Structures are given as structure tokens and as C-alpha cells.
Amino acid sequence: MAEKGIKVVATNRAARHDFFIDDVLEAGIVLTGTEVKSLRQGRAVIGDGYIYVDGGEAWAENIHIPEYSQGTWTNHAPRRKRKLLLHGHEIEDLLQRTREKGYTIVPLRLYFLDGRAKLEIGVARGKKQHDKRQALREKQDRREAERSLGVQRNINR
């Protein structure tokens, strides 16, 4: 029986720290059998990965899916390039966006949706160092405010 819902395998938390994410797309990903089995065990690293368009096709490279532990000679290469399944107009849009200065395509999340492997990709612009500091400062301020509100709520009870 096929799985229902979303099962997240890997997320790229550094992407949201290093980039402004302008657009998000969901792409299917072409995998071999041992890659799927390894992903079902919850093992993958997408932090170093990147996406590019070549010959009218989208490709994901440097995404690390470790070899399947019970695999034999049929095991896959852990960092091989993998084809992404997108519509033609989505690929054309990605190609035009990446031709603009400062834009790149980064993987954000690798997950199973109703038993099918999906890769969430984002069209992103790089952050400058001062933007990263500002975002970190805002996050700390938000946490501090929530913490002080939480303390006040507990006192009133």
C-alpha cells in the first residue's frame, strides 16, 4: 500500500540563511531503486547541492544520497547528477530567471509525497553579509519577545 502524506527526508536550512528565496517549485526527481530505498531510511544531504538547466532539462547535482546498506553491485554513486521532472514552461522560466544577475536555483527540501520522491527547489538571490546579520538580529528579537510573553502568561495563571 502506498504511503499517504508528506515524509520529509532532508532540508536545506542554510539556503534560507544564505539566500532570499523568490520563487518555490516542486519537482519530481529521477532515482534508481537503491536511491529510493536509501531515502526511505531517511538518509540524504542536500546542503551542498545545486540545480542547473542544460539542454532543455533541469539537473540536480551534488546531492548526497548514501549507498543503500543492503545493496550489492547494483548500488548507485552517492553524488551523481539526477534529472528533475518539470514541465517545459517551468524549465524555460528557470532558465530565464537564472540568466538574470545574482539568481541561482537551490534545493530546499527532499521529501516523499504520497510515496513519490519530490525535490522542492527555490529561485534565490544571494544575501550579503549585512543582510544575514539583520535577519539573525530579527530572529533573536522575535524569540526574545516570545520568551518574555511566555513568562508573563505563566505568571498570570
Image (tube, grey):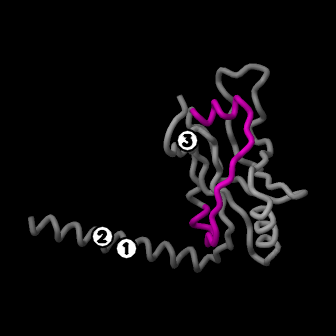
Residue at the image position 51 percent from the left and 79 percent from the top: 134
Q: Nearer the viewer, mark 1 or mark 3?
A: 3
Residue at the image position 79 percent from the left and 77 percent from the top: 100
Three-letter amino acid code at disc 2? Answer: Glu
Residue that badge 2 annotates: 146
Q: State if disc 2 and disc 3 touch (CB < 8 Å).
A: no
Three-letter amino acid code at disc 1? Answer: Arg
**Spot occupied by residue 10 in the image (x, y as percentages of width and height):** 57, 47
Location of residue 144 with respect to 130 vertically, above or below: above
**Spot occupied by residue 21 in the image (x, y as percentages of width and height):** 62, 69
CA distance for labels 1 and 3: 35 Å
Left or right, residue 67 beside residue 12: right
Q: How many residues crowd mark 3 within 10 Å: few (<14), some (14–19), many (20+)?
A: few
**Spot occupied by residue 53 in the image (x, y as percentages of width and height):** 83, 59
**Spot occupied by residue 90 in the image (x, y as percentages of width and height):** 75, 63
Three-letter amino acid code at disc 3? Answer: Asp
Q: How many residues crowd mark 2 within 10 Å: few (<14), some (14–19), many (20+)?
A: few
Element under disc 3:
loop
Q: Is residue 112 magenta?
A: no
Residue that badge 1 annotates: 142
| Magenta stretch in the rendered image | 15-40
Q: Which of the 4 image quarters holds residue 155?
A: bottom left
Kindly identify which numbered label has been placed on residue 114: 3
Element under disc 2:
helix
Q: Nearer the viewer, mark 3 or mark 2?
A: 3
Element under disc 1:
helix
**Mark positioned earlier in the residue sequence (3 or 2):** 3
